[in-house]
Image: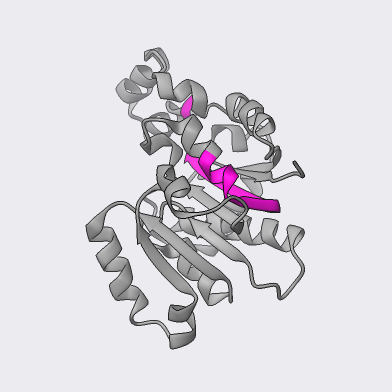
Amino acid sequence: MIRQELVARQLEERIAAHFEVGRRLRVLDAGLGDGAQALRLARAGHAVTGLESDPARLTALEAALAQEPEGIRERFRTLAGGGQDTGAHFLPGTFDVVLGHDVLDRTADPDSTLAGLARVLDTGGLLSLVLPNVTARAMRPGIAGDWAGARAALVAEPAEGDRFLRLESLTSFLARIGVPMERWYGVGVFAGDDEDTLDDDALDVEERACRVDPYRGVAQSLHLFGVRGRG
């Protein structure tokens, strides 16, 4: 829950910095999951389209959506599919904001998936990516006192996909596809992804740490923002 709240606050901050207040944005969430971020954006007045490849998750989300007020239901639509399927569903420049949260590390072809996410982003649009911090995998077991797990993470050979998910690789790739990195945050410096409480003190510490070096660089996840330039 802390992770979701941190991601939401970071996203809201960048949206506020890039778009005029009150503008209804066209949002694509290319990996809905439980729909927490997409629903939050729909409740804020934005038109949201969500892709989800897991039928069970899609059914659960549609059931949750049925409990929302009519206005929210009308501006929220779901489609079966994943981040790699944007080309099959949407024309270039369809969206103002594109979310690729926990998408790139779950696809067999992350570079083409990322290029597809960028393709459907309109000029001046905002790309939000959340992914595991593959260079700091020893931190979480180390903090927990799991020395065997920390050692295993330190000595393991990087997986092929991990090379693409490194911050420097993504920074370079985003620049090449016309969506240069604008800002990045850590997510979960001290609290793990499974932390399910919303303690105000914990949130305050995490928000501060996730913005600054060296702390953001050892967070469990990274939250990257790119902005679509003019072609």
Image location (x, y in percent) of residue 223? 57, 44
Question: Quick check: 150 left or right of 229?
Answer: left
User: Mostly what secondary structure, the magenta segment?
Assistant: strand
Residue 8 to residue 85: above or below: below
**Taking 67 as reference, is 40 left or right?**
right
Q: Is residue 121 left or right of residue 16?
A: left
Identify the image's colour scheme: rainbow, by chain, secondary structure or one colour. Answer: one colour
134 vs 88: above or below? above
Q: Position of residue 185 (x, y in %)?
A: 62, 43
Identified at 42% across, 24% down, the residue is 161
Q: Give above or below for 74 relative to 113.
A: below
Residue 130 horizontal side relative to residue 230, left or right: left
User: As rendered, which of 185 and 139 lies closer to the eye?
Assistant: 185
Q: Quadrant of the C terminus?
A: top right
| Magenta range | 116-135
Q: Residue at the location (38% across, 65% down)? A: 78
Confirm whether the magenta stretch covers residue 125.
yes
Quick one: quadrant of the N terminus?
A: bottom left
Q: Residue furthest left?
A: 56
Residue 56 quadrant:
bottom left
Q: Residue at x 46, y 30 (%)?
A: 139
Q: Is residue 213 magenta?
A: no
* Residue 34 in view, yes or no: no
Q: Is residue 110 visible?
A: yes
Q: Residue at horizontal 57%, vertical 50%?
A: 120
Which residue reaches farthest bottom? 70
Quarter assignment of residue 80: bottom left
Residue 54 x/y as whole percent: 27, 53
Position in image of residue 220 (x %, y %): 48, 38
Q: Nearer the viewer, residue 157 or 22?
A: 22
